Amino acid sequence: ILGEIAKGNKDAIFTMDLYTQKIVDYLVNYINKIGPKVDALIFTAGVGENSTLMRAEVLNKLNVVDVNIDKTANEAKIGEF
């Protein structure tokens, strides 16, 4: 999908948009239960660990809390932190 997004494939872009929105919706449900003070978000398991675009898109859509993305850390490969 990432390769197709890079090519401008509208279906791939829509798929990523829908996928990241579902993740954000899920996060908002939990944030609503624990309160607005979120110290960190940890992305795991395959795509969460390996897709800088997916992590950035999720955080860009998460409007209910003030989160900032560390671009250097987000773009680093696992094991380089």
Image (tube, rainbow, N blue to C red):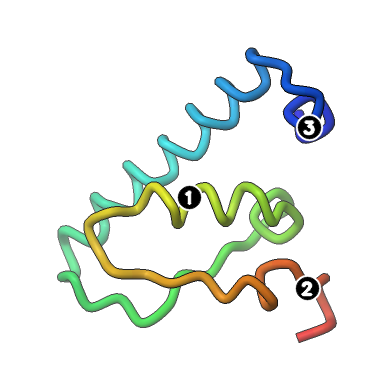
At 72% from the left and 52% from the top, the residue drawn is 51
Quadrant of the image occupied by residue 80 = bottom right
Name the residue: 36% across, 82% down. 39
Which residue is rendered at x = 52% and y = 47% of the image?
Answer: 57
Q: Residue at x 25, y 65 (%)?
A: 65
- The mark closer to the camera, 2 or 3, is 3
Q: Which mark is residue 32?
A: none
Q: Which numbered disc covers residue 58?
A: 1
* Callout in the foreground (1, 3): 3
User: Which residue type carries mark 2?
Assistant: Ala
Where residue 7 appears, as percent x and y from the top left, is 81, 24
Q: Which residue is mark 3?
A: 6
Q: Earlier in the sequence, mark 2 or mark 1?
A: 1
Vertical relation: 42 (above or below) 60: below
Identify whether 66 is placed above or below 7.
below
Q: What kind of residue is marked 3?
A: Ala
Residues under numbered marks 2 and 1 in contact, where contact means CB atoms less than 8 Å apart? no
From mark 1 to mark 3, how far is it between C-alphas? 18 Å
Tell me the CA gap for discs 2 and 1: 17 Å
Label 3 sits on a secondary structure element that is: helix
- What's the residue type where badge 1 is placed? Val
Q: Where's residue 42, x and y in %?
A: 53, 70
Residue 55 located left or right of residue 37:
right
- Residue 58 % position (x, y): 48, 50
Q: Label 2, on which residue?
A: 76
Q: Which quadrant is the C terminus positioned in?
A: bottom right
**Crowdedness of circle 3 by 10 Å Cα count: few (<14), some, many (20+)?**
few
User: Is the residue 75 above or below the residue 39 in the image?
Assistant: above
